[in-house]
Image (cartoon, rainbow, N blue to C red):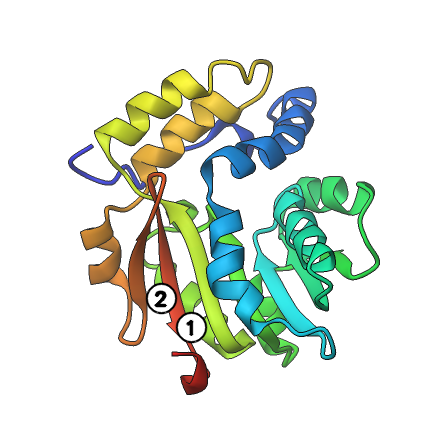
Amino acid sequence: MRQRASGATELMDAADCDPAKLERTYRQFGLVNRLFSGWRRLYVQELRPLLSARTVTTVLDIGSGGGDLARQLSTWARRDRLLLDVTGIDPDSRAYSFAAGRPHHPSIRFVRADSADLVRAGRTFDVVISNHVIHHLQPADLPRFLTDSQALARRLCLHNDLRRSAAAYGLFSLAALPFLGSFIRPDGMVSIRRSYTTAELAAAAPPGWHVLRHPPFHQVLLHRTDPTNA
């Protein structure tokens, strides 16, 4: 835990991983994220103040995986009677197929792409988010990811990720025991080892980006483009 295990690999990233386990993992992501990722708090504190009942706010979810976060944000916004349009992108054909094949509101769309594809296409969104993506990146890839995020976001970038610690590793190893038959527990433990500490992430982030500790055992890398939202 003293050093980031950036070279460790997750089972679900293997091209020949068990497809049944992979689908079960995508299905369980929704519950895991609701329990551990803290997006309800981020929605209330950071996203909801930007939304309107009259004007559509656009959100790009980079590395959208099984699409559970896009669907959850859309559900919360509709309950609050606010207009939100969410685009989820993922370069993995398996993740794209799963997310696109699941029922979702017309205000949500999934695209097989990465951030660089959208930058080249000249696309922009009000808000750019990601969940558990940063720890997957090699140190040399993080600057490009953040540069792409800034190019794509008109108002806010919000990247939520794990915060490495022995406590997070130990507690998750116990809490994830019920998630049998999937990659949730073994890959989650690898993800914690691959993740940054707050000090490491702050040191790696370019000027203008801020790291906020986010319970439980998470942290947010944030960049505000619109000075009125600072």
Q: Quadrant of residue 26?
A: top right
Q: Is residue 225 left or right of residue 206?
A: right
Name which residue type carries label 2: Pro
Viewer-proximal residue among 41 and 183: 41
Q: Quadrant of residue 51?
A: bottom right
Q: Are marks 1 and 2 in contact (CB under 8 Å)?
A: yes
Q: Is residue 224 left or right of residue 184?
A: left
Location of residue 83 with respect to 109 vertically, above or below = below
The residue under the point 69% across, 28% down is 23
The residue under the point 23% across, 28% down is 166
Name which residue type carries label 1: Thr
Q: Secondary structure at mark 1?
A: helix
> Where is residue 15 shown, x and y percent of the image?
60, 33
> Where is residue 61 shown, x and y percent of the image?
59, 58
Image quarter hosting the C terminus: bottom left
Q: Is residue 87 left or right of residue 138?
A: right
The residue under the point 61% across, 48% down is 69
The residue under the point 23% across, 51% down is 198
Location of residue 188 with respect to 42 vertically, above or below = above
Q: Residues within 10 Å of mark 2 (few under 14, many from 20)?
A: some
Residue 7: in sight, yes or no? no
For marks 1 and 2, give the CA distance.
Answer: 6 Å
Q: Secondary structure at mark 2?
A: helix
Picture mark count: 2
Which residue is label 1 attached to?
147
Viewer-proximal residue among 135 and 217: 217
Image quarter hosting the N terminus: top left
Location of residue 67 with respect to 220 vertically, above or below = above
Which residue is label 2 attached to?
143
> Where is residue 229 shown, x and y percent of the image?
44, 79
Q: Residues within 10 Å of mark 1 (few under 14, many from 20)?
A: some
